[in-house]
């Protein structure tokens, strides 16, 4: 029984430290040249709303949605914009 006790403690510590939270880093943000595609739908009746208690095990059925309009956001180099100063900067 004494040999089992340290093993139980070790497994408990491992299971507690194994829980993690997501981390947002710079690698997930868009960079120059990326295009974000947006789709807008104005059909709230297409959402199959099955209300469940809060917490885990949520199910969202958005398969009935169709895009009424789309929009593409292209991330360009700020130096190519109209507001970028073209004259040399004095220091």
Image: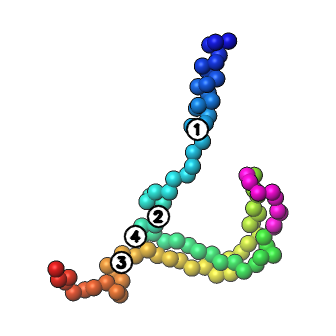
Q: First in sequence: mark 2 or mark 3?
A: 2
**Tag 1 residue:** 18
SS for dot 3: helix
Alpha carbons under labels 4 and 3: distance apart: 9 Å
Mark 1, mark 3: which one is toward the viewer? 1
Which percent across, then down, holds residue 78?
35, 77
Q: Which mark is residue 59?
A: none
Badge 4: residue crowd in 10 Å (few <14, some 14–19, many ≥20): few
Q: Is residue 82 above or below residue 67?
A: below
Above or below, comparing residue 59 to residue 77 in the picture:
above
Cα gap from disc 2 to disc 1, whole angstroms? 26 Å
Which residue is the site of mark 2? Answer: 29
Helix, strand or loop status at disc 4: loop
Name the disc covering residue 78, or none. Answer: 3
* Residue 23 covered by magenta stretch: no
Q: Earlier in the sequence, mark 4 or mark 3?
A: 4
The kind of secondary structure element at disc 1 is loop
Could you say where residue 44 lies in the image, as x and y percent from the top left?
A: 77, 76
In 3D space, how far apart are the residues under numbered discs 2 and 3 (Cα atoms)?
16 Å
On the image, numbered disc 4 is attached to which residue? 32
Q: Name the residue rendered at 76%, 78% in the picture.
A: 43
Mark closest to the chain's N terminus, 2 or 1:
1
């Amino acid at each position: 029984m004494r040999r089992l006790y340290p093993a139980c403690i070790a497994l408990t510590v491992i299971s507690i430290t194994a829980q993690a939270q997501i981390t947002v880093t710079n690698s997930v943000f868009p960079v120059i040249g990326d295009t974000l595609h947006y789709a807008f739908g104005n059909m709230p009746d297409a959402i199959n709303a099955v209300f469940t208690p809060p917490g885990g095990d949520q199910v969202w059925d958005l398969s009935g949605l169709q895009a009424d309009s789309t929009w593409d956001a292209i991330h360009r180099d700020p130096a190519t914009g109209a507001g970028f100063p073209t004259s040399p900067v004095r220091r």
